[in-house]
Amino acid sequence: MTKVSFIGLGNMGLPMAKNLVRAGHDVTGFDLVEGQLTELVKSGGKVSENLNDTLKNSEVVITMLPSGKHVKSVYLGEEGIIKNSPAGLLLIDSSTIDVESAREVEEVANKSNLKMLDAPVSGGVTGAEAGTLTFMVGGDEEAFEKGKELLDIMGGNVIHAGQAGNGQVAKICNNMLLAISMIGTSEAFNLAERLGLDSQTFYDISSTASGQCWSMTSYCPVPGPVPTSPANNNYKPGFSSALMLKDLRLSQEASKITNTETPLGAHSTEVYEKMEKGGYDNLDFSGVIKLISGELK
């Protein structure tokens, strides 16, 4: 049994923490929303009002936070985790943030004799609940081996991406590709329909032809062909358009820093910004097909 402090019990963090509890670990949660803490307690976890006292008895800290500024706020400074943690504590940040912030925090942690991993995830709320997330992990090999047992409980695929920050690199590049793929898939379905080919038939053909991709076969943006896709649930988000836009913006920041041309990534960012401006960013990211079809204004 490992003593875990889990900070950030949102839509992703809470089911991840629950899976650790079910596996027999001692999990103490922290969140600003009282209802999320209550849910963790119902599942057998614990809560504490004094994080710094809890850290002294923890073996691992896991964070799932909204952005880089939140991660830096929680980890750095006199009241932060790093200053108030015993030597040897393993820190795992599963937030999706900019690469620069991830590497900055991990450098400070290492100088304080703490091991740290950046371990963003892919798989959405469904994957978090099922314990099938993909973890893309940056950090040194020793820290990775130490944290892998816990990550294996929360995920179906745990991949070491190399040095500090590389988990974030993998996440933003993967999601940029996913956005491009989803927009292309949506355009194809819309065009096929307007040319007189129904969605199921087009799916049956393209899902076994050269146009096949994850956005089609696992997360099809039209109702019908893939029963588990959000399209069959009014585009209720497994991964919202707002979160996709966040990751796309991170990819574009990185492209500027590295002077890397990403024209399709840039265009995808513009498309999801239209979802945001129209007030539709609460839809699943596959709901972009409704924007492309002209259904959303």
Image: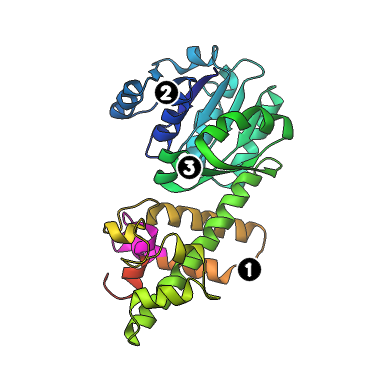
Q: Position of residue 181 (x, y in %)?
A: 50, 67
Disc number at residue 29? 2
Question: Residue placed at 56% from the left, 29% from the top?
Answer: 150
Give above or below for 216 relative to 60: below
Q: Bounds of the magenta span? A: 272-287
**Quarter holding residue 126:** top left
Q: Crowdedness of circle 3 by 10 Å Cα count: few (<14), some, many (20+)? A: some
**286 in magenta:** yes
**Does residue 31 appear left or right of residue 234 in this picture?**
right
Residue bearing the label numbered 3? 67
Residue bearing the label numbered 1? 261
Q: Amino acid at mark 3?
A: Ser
**Quarter holding residue 233:** bottom left
Q: Amino acid at mark 2?
A: Gly
**163 in magenta:** no
Given contact means CB atoms under 8 Å apart, are the residues at marks 1 and 2 in contact?
A: no
Q: Position of residue 270 (x, y in %)?
A: 44, 67
Question: Residue placed at 53% from the left, 66% from the top?
Answer: 265
Instruction: Assign a secondary structure to mark 3.
Output: loop
CA distance separating discs 3 and 1: 24 Å
Given contact means CB atoms under 8 Å apart, are the residues at marks 3 and 2 in contact?
A: no
Q: Position of residue 123 (x, y in %)?
A: 47, 48
Looking at this view, name the residue that lies furthest to the bottom: 195
